[in-house]
Image (cartoon, rainbow, N blue to C red):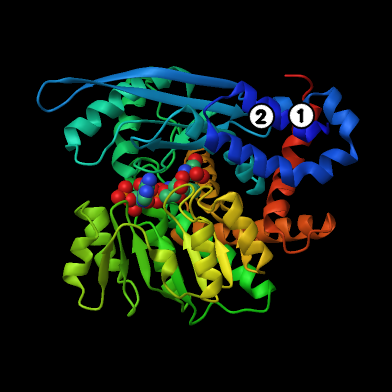
Amino acid sequence: MSYVDEVFDLVVAKNPAQPEFHQAVKEVLESLRVVIEAEEEKYRKDALLERLVTPERQLIFRVPWVDDKGQVQVNNGYRVQFNSAIGPYKGGLRLHPSVNLGIIKFLGFEQIFKNSLTGLPIGGGKGGSDFDPKGKSDREVMAFCQSFINELYKYIGANTDVPAGDIGTGAREIGYMYGQYKRLTGLYEGVLTGKGLSYGGSLARTEATGYGLLYLTEEMLKCNGRDIKNKVIAVSGAGNVAIYAIQKAKQLGAKPVTCSDSTGWIYDPAGIDVDLLKEVKEVKRARLTEYAAARPSAEYHEGKGVWSVACDIALPCATQNELDLEDAKMLVANRCFAVAEGANMPTTMEATEYLQQNKVLFCPGKASNAGGVATSALEMSQNSERLSWTFKEVDSKLKEIMVNIFHNLDDAAKKYNMKGNYVAGANIAGFLKVAEAMTAQGIV
Ligand code: NDP
Ligand code: 2IT
C-alpha cells in the first residue's frame, strides 16, 4: 500500500467519529500523492506524514459559567495546537453549538497549510467551544469568555499561540478574552488578534477575510482572461466574512445578490445593501427577515437555497459542507464559472470534483480565505513593534499577499502538471514549506 494511503487509514483508525477531520486530511493527502511518491522512502522513514496529521498538543477543558438566572452552565473548551514548524500556533476560536474535537482538528489542520501559504511566520492551531453566543446577554458572553480564558491563558501567549475570531467570535468576545488574559498575566501583549482599535487591534482586520477573498478572486479571474466587473455573485453567510466579501465585490463593480444565515436566505436582484446588512447583523444581531422587511427589492426564503440562484461567481462564506453535489450541479447548469471559498471547507469533496470536471475555476478556502489570518499576522507585527499602520498600508499588504498566494498555487499546480487545479496547487505549496521546516528541525 502506498505511504499516503497507509497514513490516511491510520488517521481514520486513530480518530474515530471525526468525519470532518478525515475529509480535510483526505483532500490534502490526495493532492500530495505526487509529491510524496517522488520521495516516498525519505518521508516514510521520517514519519513526516504521521507527524503532520498528529497535533503537537490537544487541550480539552471545562468551562463553567453562571447565566442570568443564576444557573451554572458547563461547556467544553478546546485548543488544538497542531503544528509550530514555521511559527507560533495561530488560528481562530469557534463558538457554536456544533463544535467538537473533530471539527476543531479539521480547522486546525487546514490552518497549517493556509498559514504557510500567507508567506508569514505562523504555525497552525484552532480552538473554540460548544457555547452558543446567540441569544445570550453581554454579561453571559463575558462570563463565558472569562471562564474560557481562566483555563486557556496558561497555554497561549504572543510568542507561543495567538488565537483570534471565527464563527461566533467577533470583536466583543475577543475584547472580553483579552481583558481577562491581561488581568491574569499582567501582560499587555499581542496574545489575541482581531482586537478593538483602541487596544492594539489592526485597521482592516475586520474587513480582511472578505476583502482578501475578492482580491484573490479578481486575480484568479484576470489570469483566466475574465473580468469581475458586472458579474453576478451568489454569496452564502451573513457574518464577518460574507459582509466584507459583499462590500468589496460591490467596490470592484460586481453585483452580489444573495446572503444567508442558519435559518434562511435573501435574494436581492438589485444587489445586497451592505449598510442595511451590517445594521441587521452587526448592530442588531437580528435575523435576515429584518433585512427583507426593510428592503422592497429583496425576497426572503426559509432554509437553504442561495446556490439555486443564477450567478457567474459563487462565494460560500458560511460553514463547512454547505455546498454539496446537488448545489454544484445547479451552479454549473446556471453557467457559474468560478467558485472561491470564503468559509473553511464549505464545498464537499464530490461537489469540488464536479465543479473541476466542469471547468469551473475553483479556489479552496485555505488559499482564498487566508486574508484574515494574514492580517492577523500583520496585527502581531504591529503589536511587537508597538506601532499601528494606516488602513491603506494594511490593505495594500493584504492585497499583495492574496495576489502572491494565487500565483504560488497557480505555479505549484503547473509545476506538478495539474494546471488550473488550485486545490492541488494550494495543498502542495502549503505543504512544501512546512515539510522543509519540519525536516530541518529534526524529530520533534
Ligand atoms: P460569523 O459567525 O461572523 O458568521 C457566520 C455566518 O454563517 C452566519 O451568517 C451564520 O448564520 C452562518 N452559519 C454558521 N454556521 C452555520 C450553519 N451550521 N448552517 C448555516 N449557516 C451557518 O463567522 P465568520 O463570517 O467569521 O466565518 C464564516 C466562515 O469563514 C467559517 O467557515 C470560518 O471558519 C471562516 N473563516 C473566518 C475567518 C475570519 O476571519 N472570521 C477567516 C477565514 C475563514 P447564523 O448567524 O444564523 O448562525
Ligand atoms: O479560519 C481562519 O483563518 C480564521 N478564523 C482566522 C484566524 C486568525 O488567526 O486570524
Q: Which residue is found at the position 87% from the left and 34% from the top? A: 40
Hey, which quadrant is residue 176 in on the image?
Answer: top left
The quarter of the picture where residue 154 lies is: top left
- Mark 1 closeness class: few <14, some 14–19, many ≥20 residues within 10 Å: few
Give coordinates of residue 72: x percent, y percent.
19, 18
> Residue 404 versus residue 218: which sits nearer the camera?
218
State the residue at coordinates (33%, 44%).
171
Q: Which residue is mark 2?
A: 53
Secondary structure of the residue carrying numbered label 2: helix
Percent of width and height locating residue 392: 48, 62
Q: What is the distance, in whole Å, between disc 2 and disc 1 at their CAs?
A: 12 Å
The reply, left or right, for residue 77 in relation to residue 435 is: left
**Image side of residue 291 versus residue 152, left or right:** left
Q: Nearer the viewer, residue 353 or 267?
A: 353
Extreme-bottom residue of the structure: 230
The dot on residue 6 is 1
Badge 2 crowding class, 10 Å Cα cut-off, few under 14, some 14 to 19, many 20 or more, is some
Instruction: Name which quarter of the figure residue 406 lies in.
Output: bottom right
Residue type at mark 1 is Glu
Which image quarter is the C terminus in?
A: top right
As drawn, 41 above or below 318: above
Q: Residue 43 at what x, y percent from top left? A: 84, 30
Sooner in the amino-acid sequence: mark 2 or mark 1: 1
User: Which amino acid type is marked by label 2?
Assistant: Val
Q: Residue at x 69, y 72 (%)?
A: 223
Tell whether circle 1 marks a residue whose Cβ is less than 8 angstroms from ligand 2.
Answer: no
